[in-house]
Image (spheres, grey):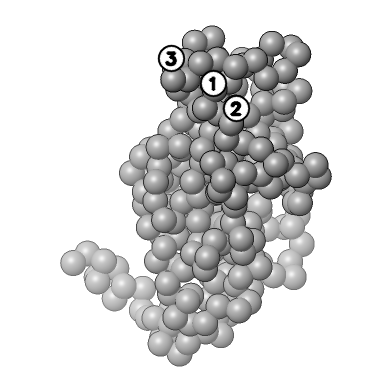
Amino acid sequence: MDPGVCPMCFQNYSQERKPMIVCQEGHSICEFCSKTVDHLQPKPFALGGFSQIYKAKWNTKDVVIKRINLFLDEKSHQQFENELKLSMKLEHPSIIQMYGKTEMDKVIGIIMDFANEGDLTQKIPSLTFEEQIDYSLQIIDGIRVLHSNSIIHRDLKPENILVCDNKPKISDFGISKVRENTLKVTSVTISYRYSAPELFQKGGVYDTSCDIFSLSMILYSIFSKKEPFQNQNDIFIPAKIIMGKDQNFQVTSHKDYQKLLRKDGVQIQKNDAH
């Protein structure tokens, strides 16, 4: 990190943004940031496989601080900051807003919007058909924006789509690559049911098409209100995905949507070509 840059908001120190010492070890942030984050709850209200999530305030706005339990070497730390800087520039209703980072005891925390309705897994069971369509279009638009900014999510799944005021917002896109390069592939870090075949193939290239595969699994979950490969052992799912095995998907949603799924594949390709 450049010593002349605030490590939280990445702005250069200036007369308006003077460096402020914030701990006994001499770490500093700009004067503006030192006044904006407060009322951090002493205990996390949510836990992940590699993170704890705390509720806090940012300019009087409810936010969360997601503390990432990863040891980052210098290269990975710089990569993380580059990803976060790019993520902070994205302002879109279908993408969770990120505001910066904080660091305590060498543990990085990402400051982002607070999703007051949890994640998509909690919302799916109660969605009406109209909401299923609306949510799907918003998620698709959010992924479009990520890809147009050269961001590949790498870990799209319902748990990484947060819901705020009945609006889905894609999250965790700024840390997926760093986590992937830092941790070994385990059941904790990989969502088999939503992962593209390339993830399980040696030398597989992970590009935007992998996100599209994950998107298709998410859309199936939205309209069927079921997980892909439900009631199947995680051990066998990667092989089925690689071989393209029939997943026996059953959609009990609106009859018009069922008709669309049953349309002849050739006809769909013809429509897509026009």
Q: Are marks 2 and 1 in contact (CB under 8 Å)?
A: yes
Q: Name the residue under label 2.
A: 34
- Does residue 232 appear in this view? yes
Question: Which one is in front, 89 or 236?
Answer: 89
Above or below, comparing residue 227 to residue 71 in the picture: below
Q: Which of marks 3 and 2 is nearer the N terminus?
A: 3
Q: Is residue 212 left or right of residue 60?
A: left
Rendered image: mark on residue 30: 1
Label 3 or label 1, whichever comes before in sequence order: 3
Within 10 Å of disc 2 (Cα), the crowding (few <14, some 14-19, many 20+) is: some
Q: Which amino acid does label 2 sit on?
A: Ser
Residue 8: x and y in percent read 56, 27
Instruction: Judge from the rendering whether residue 59 lies leftward or rightward of residue 119; answer left or right.
Output: left
Return the residue nearer the eye: 45 or 144: 45
Query: Judging from the image, what secondary structure is the residue with disc 1 in?
Result: strand
Kindly state the secondary structure of the residue where label 3 is placed. Answer: loop
List x then y, in percent, for residue 151. Answer: 43, 39
